[in-house]
Amino acid sequence: MGDVLLLQELIARKASWSESKTTVVFTNGCFDLIHAGHVRYLAAARSLGGALVVGLNGDASVRRLKGPSRPIIPENERAEILAAFECVDVVTIFDEETPLKLIEALTPDVLVKGGDWPLEAIIGREHVLSHGGRVLSLPLLEGRSTSSVISRIRGEST
């Protein structure tokens, strides 16, 4: 089971990973209603290194990005759920619209997003590449998204 850490605690953890030459992978997202697409994506991200850090959009950030009816699940519960995954080492919550400050503070070895993000649009790409890291866009599980799950629950066509 992973940990939910504040940024300062994460930076300290990163230092110990660096000492042991552990490859740190970073991804981020809202992870509002967990579905198979999330599970497969996180497992694939973790397979790219020795530690997976998930930057979790806080509630205010999700509302700005997704609208006033989101998130469905509060940030502390979303963080706890993600940290329970065997493939997730650390979850840290951020409230900005993008994880750029978090990525710059962490400087992961590998930065990943889902296949709906073209490489050139991935936030933090330049920072990670300038420090010798890799940036990847991983394939998504077709037809799986939190928005589509919510639409189905509401009886809306997708």
Image: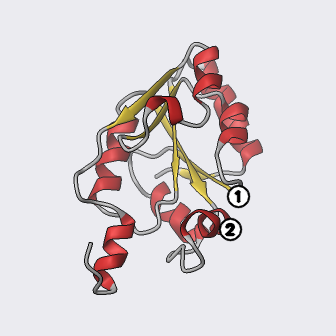
**Inter-mark Cα distance, 2 to 1:** 6 Å
* Residue indicated by mark 1: 95
Q: Earlier in the sequence, mark 2 or mark 1?
A: 2
Q: Is residue 21 visible?
A: yes
- Horizontally, residue 7 falls left or right of residue 138, namely right
Circle 2/circle 1 CB separation < 8 Å? yes
Q: Is residue 147 above or below residue 150?
A: above
Q: Quadrant of the C terminus?
A: bottom left
Label 2 amino acid? Ala
Q: Secondary structure at mark 2?
A: helix
Q: Is residue 80 above or below residue 139?
A: below
* Residue indicated by mark 2: 60
- Horizontally, residue 156 falls left or right of residue 55, namely left
Work out which residue is located at the far right of the displayed protein and give it.
Answer: 8
Rendering coords of residue 123 (x, y %): 59, 37
Q: Residue at x 38, y 66 (%)?
A: 146
Q: Which quadrant holds residue 95? A: bottom right
Rendering coords of residue 145 (x, y %): 34, 61
